[in-house]
């Protein structure tokens, strides 16, 4: 089976579009080496491009520094994964076409955003997210949980730019909704600033 090429992975794709171009291959029972080659090819051929609106929003953020101890940094990464899981699930359900329910769905699927939960381990994050997917949305199916896991893993492997683009999309979704906009002040704006400054991204996220 040939690896995906430039015809199937176009520069400038949104993260969810990039993921969908390779997920059919990545979810098949293929060898680990083949999956790694798919991921490497995706990184080589795909460039995360920020729109003018996104660049303008980045300019509006204030310049902050975050002094986090090891334990707090660990929790920050876990909450980021929780938020991205909720976002990727919403994108998976709607196909990237946001609707009036999108702010509610993301908030409900993320315990971090719904009631300020903090986590101590990745299994805790995954169990919490899985339970919420099977309880709250209109469409509930365990396969949707596993697909969201795969989507989020792909976004994280694509690097900080892909994560930032997802966070900016969440920021826009919440900005246009009352009362979800409050969560931008509590979480999303700081995450957008912090993710640009954090060092050893893959090492830190992998360690979480």
Image: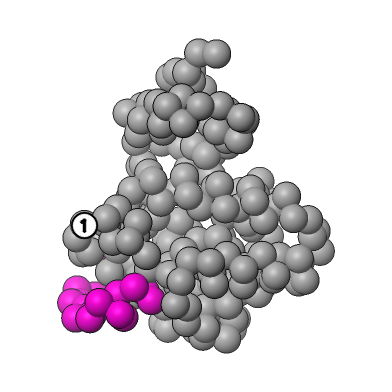
Report the side of 197 relative to 191 (left or right).
left
Asked if the magenta segment contains residue 139, the reply would be: no
Percent position of residue 61, x then y? 28, 71
| Residue 90 at x, y percent in the picture | 64, 58
Q: Is residue 67 magenta?
A: yes
Which image quadrant: the N terminus? top right
On the rendered image, what quadrant is the C terminus found in? bottom left
Question: What count of labels does the image hold?
Answer: 1
**What residue span does the magenta drawing correspond to?**
58-76
User: Which quadrant of the figure has residue 167?
Assistant: bottom left
The residue shown at (45%, 56%) is 166
Q: In this view, does 175 lie above or below 163?
A: below
Q: Is residue 139 above or below residue 158?
A: below
> As drawn, is 198 to the left or to the right of 47?
left
Would you say 204 lies left or right of 175 here? left
Residue 180 occupies quadrant: bottom right
Residue drawn at point x = 41 percent, y = 51 percent: 156
Pointer 1 residue = 200
**Secondary element at tag 1:** loop
Residue shown at the point (32%, 28%) measured from the top left: 44
């Amino acid at each position: 089976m040939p690896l995906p090429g430039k015809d199937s992975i176009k520069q400038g794709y949104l993260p969810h579009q990039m993921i969908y171009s390779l997920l059919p291959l990545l979810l098949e029972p293929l060898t680990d080496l083949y999956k790694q080659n798919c991921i490497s090819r995706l990184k080589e051929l795909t460039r995360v491009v920020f729109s003018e609106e996104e660049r303008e929003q980045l300019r509006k953020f204030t310049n902050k520094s975050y002094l986090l101890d090891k334990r707090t940094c660990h929790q920050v990464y876990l909450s980021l994964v929780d938020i991205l899981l909720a976002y990727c699930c919403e994108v998976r359900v709607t196909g990237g076409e946001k609707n009036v329910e999108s702010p509610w769905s993301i908030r409900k699927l993320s315990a971090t955003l719904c009631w300020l939960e903090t986590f101590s381990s990745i299994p805790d994050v995954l169990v919490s997210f899985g339970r919420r997917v099977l309880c709250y949305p209109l469409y509930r199916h365990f396969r949707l949980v596993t697909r969201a896991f795969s989507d989020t893993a792909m976004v994280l492997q694509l690097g900080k730019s892909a994560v930032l683009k997802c966070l900016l999309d969440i920021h826009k979704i919440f900005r246009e909704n009352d009362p979800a906009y409050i969560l931008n002040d509590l979480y999303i704006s700081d995450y957008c600033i912090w993710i640009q400054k954090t060092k050893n991204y893959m090492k830190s996220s992998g360690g979480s």
